[in-house]
Image (spheres, rainbow, N blue to C red):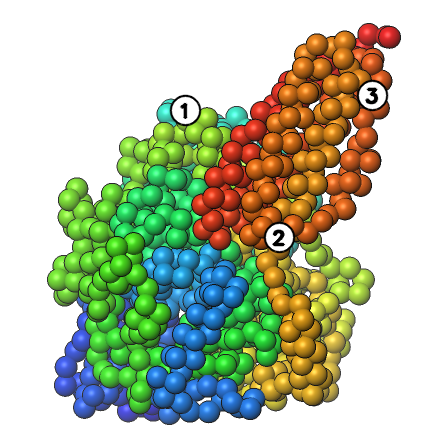
Amino acid sequence: MDGSQAHQSRDSIADIWGERTPFEGEGQWPERVDQLLAEEPDRWVQSACVTCSNGCAMDIGVKDGRIVGVRGRAADRVNHGRLGPKGLHSWMANGSPDRLKHPLIRKDGQLVEASWDEAMELIVQKSQELVRTRTASSIGFYTTGQLFLEEYYLLGLIGKAGLGTPHMDANTRLCTATAGASLMQSFGTPGNPGSYRDFDTTECILHFGHNIAETDTVLWSRILDRRRGPNPPRLIAVDIRETPTTREADLHIAPRPGTNLAVLNGLLHLVIGAGAIDRDFIEAHTLGFDDLAHVVKDYTPERVEALSGVPADKLRQAGQWLSEARSMVSTALQGVYQSHQATPSACALNNLHLIRGMIGRPGATVFQMNGQPTSQNTHEAGADGELPAFFNWDNPDHMAELARRWNVEVDKLPHWAEPTHALQIFRLAEQLSIRMLWIQCTNPAVSMPYLGRVRGILGNPDLFVVVQDAFLTETAELADVVLPTAIWGEKTGTFTNVDRTCHLSLKAVDPPGQARSDFDIFLDYARRMGFRDKDGAPLVKFSDPEGAFDDFREVTRGRPCDYSGMTYEKLRGGSGIQWPCNDEHPDGCERLYRGGIFATHPDYAASYGHDIVTGGNILPEEYRAKEPHGRAFLKAAHYQPPSEEPEEEYPFWLSTGRLVYHFHTRTKTARSPELRAAAPDDWVQVNPEDAAEQGIREGDWVRIESRRGRIEAPARLGDIPRGRLFVPFHFGYWDDPGRARAANELTLFEWDPVSKQPHYKFLAVRITRVARPSTVQPDEKETKNPTLKDQARRAAEAASSAIKPPRQHVSDYLGLLIESETALARMFEEVAKAHAKDADVHSMGRRMATWTQNQVDALRPFVERYGDTSQVEPKRLARALSPRLQPTGIGLLRDLQDCWLMANEIHICLCVLKQAALALRDERLKAVVLALERQNKRQRSWLQTRILSAAPQALIVPE
């Protein structure tokens, strides 16, 4: 669209944040209606923006069945009529001539047009075959942060209660998984506690790893307006480079990549040392302060400077301001979430608010920000690694309640372990344990880390890939089936932003060609698969988005994200509404945790939490023993160096990030002429002194190489410290510049232990000036067209499978367990005989041997069903642990220890078989394994008790 012909309130490309309207006071932010129109519309249709996590309300202008522009909704609480450059321009993608209009299926290595029946029947046949031959655990779903709540809810329902697969996640894992994880670790449930209106009154704002000026432009406008009004809040920005956010800040702190936790521990050290803590709040409403204080006590400004490079005087200044402020709002985003020790760092930010009692009241909150407009709904609706309504997968009562609300057997729902996260889904697909991967509205062939590896996974001809999208993305090029979808403006649904405000987006125009909404595609799949509830009725009991919303509302009743009082009718016109919205809060709730009551009660919490260093799950009984009962957790950890750091061969730090004009892989924003012209290509940001040493000048072509790949881009000098580089991550290959340029060719395939969010913000690279680009971009199109070698390999595998078909490995662990139990029975008998004069050991040893042999007998029926593959490890272990059988104190101690080690081998076998029994829905095997677990627990308990009793005498008294 020619900007000179547009009806626009401002040129948002040049004037990103618009004119200032200074103010102070909650609810005082003035209205300002931003708009951009190609033509005057015939009518306006209510909607909201889907190009960042702010969730700005807007109206869509329609003329002759086409979208011709947008305007902000002045009455909305989120944006008061304002829109940013992406919100004003990205609607142009709807009319792009390269929209997908027909289903595509792969034939002879090429994607060709097909009918909907042909495409859907192919997907259904593949699904049914895999469920029959390999179980539902051979199917995975990888979704987006762009669908509507109703679509996520339907997807979660058919995946979890229809198929029963644990392998469902979203690309929100890549951008804001740590936000939800840290909120659960600290407060018991995802969902930010505060309101955007907290910015209107706060005295101090801390942006940590959050370039808000470019990622959330309208929210930044609100902050700028507040900063231009009376009593402006102090602003502290923590970012490794200089940005529009840091230039506005009163204090800019630039740590070395991977050292966020050291800086946050230093700030906590200063605040506690200044006595600026709310002791009454801490004692009444938190757990873990003593441990937190102990962890941070040695993080002095001088030590933090040595670890992070942040000058001690700057850290002291920040600590002083945070200690003096009577109210404080903090935000975090990818600079925390995609970096080293992400969850401990995000939790440390929560700790900063908890120890100051700054939560649940006006002007005082922490925002663990989201990166995408509907990512909050992936958590709430159960389309990712969560269950709907924040039900806790590790709480049997929660699982029974969810099964009741969906009217399915509880064992149908996959809850035997923590749900599979995105990178693990791709790893399982790499192993071909997952044989079908269904991807919706996301582009992992550009957005995932270590793209060479990801392309290899998606390009494997033996992996059946379904891609549901509006454009032929780099990922869709690798698919076996491509389903054309409607996008924003072409379908109806709701979505929820960072401060829990839900908006209704109504269908304004029809999608092009045969494209269908994601909701209708999922509904069609459920019908063709014949999913039923436990009474034989259709599992899916609604037929349109409003019906799905009503069903979801009832599932959330009484849960933290309670939508039960919200309806489409309430959401029409006016403003969006925050959850919880219920009988108690019929118009929504501005702030959570008023009065310091958090969602941590064992019967209510969405998670029992994790060890924030290792990611190990906290057991239900361990959680209950803490007796949180509404108190928040102060979780602390020490700084540890990142896994990859610069060294001689790769001497520079590289970080990736966003640009203000683009969203993710530019699928829509690059199809707006103005946004594309504003940021047409990627670049590498280099410190001028580093550039001079390398002979690099502004605009020179440079090659960036990591241990995983290489890219080439022009250099841009300035605004970054020495030793560091920055590359935008948006640019892939669909518009083919003829060179390797996707930043994720370089990044690490590793993740935070708790949130499972990948590390994009630190990696070691080298930089070289080149005369011109010479690295050819990867050719994705040939990876699904098998070579003769591939065909020969698969033919050999097919011939082999005709003789020895693929099998489950339950038999391996049955064999391992039986051999281990047999070895332990023999060991108990030998120990009882050798220590016959020790009456307790003699009698209990014989009894334990009998128990153990009985356990072997109980397993025999399952050998007939699953087989029994003999295993040599237990025999080797038994030989290694062979009891000394010396009738002395130390001899008895060592003999009991050997038995205890073998009993623990059996314990692990039983744990593994229990998971298999749950996944197989084998009630008989599960019952037997649970009974054996109880016996094994008694054995281990007796052995440990007897070991502890014998140890002092055996070790300290000479024999």
Which label sits on residue 90?
A: none
- Where is residue 200 drawn, in percent x and y? 29, 51
- Where is residue 394 drawn, in percent x and y? 44, 42
Image quadrant where one finds the N terminus: bottom left
Residue 93 or residue 16, whichever sits in front: 93
Residue 453 or residue 818, whichever sits in front: 818
Which label sits on residue 885?
A: 3
Left/right placement of residue 488 relative to residue 27 reads: right
Q: Tag 2, which secondary structure?
A: loop
Left/right placement of residue 497 relative to residue 700 reads: left
Left/right placement of residue 938 relative to residue 488 reads: right
Give the residue number, with chain letter if any, for mark 1. Answer: 283
Disc 3 marks a residue whose amino acid type is Leu
Disc 1 marks a residue whose amino acid type is Glu
Who's the residue at 76% across and 44% down the image?
873
Who's the residue at 60% across and 48% down the image?
863
Which label sits on residue 867?
A: 2
Residue 674 or residue 612, whichever sits in front: 612
- Where is residue 916 drawn, in percent x and y? 53, 50
Distance (Cα) linking label 1 and label 3: 54 Å
Distance (Cα) linking label 2 and label 3: 35 Å
Residue that protrudes farthest toward the right in the picture? 959
Place residue 64 in its image quadrant.
bottom left
Q: Earlier in the sequence, mark 1 or mark 3?
A: 1
Q: Residues within 10 Å of mark 2 (few under 14, many from 20)?
A: some
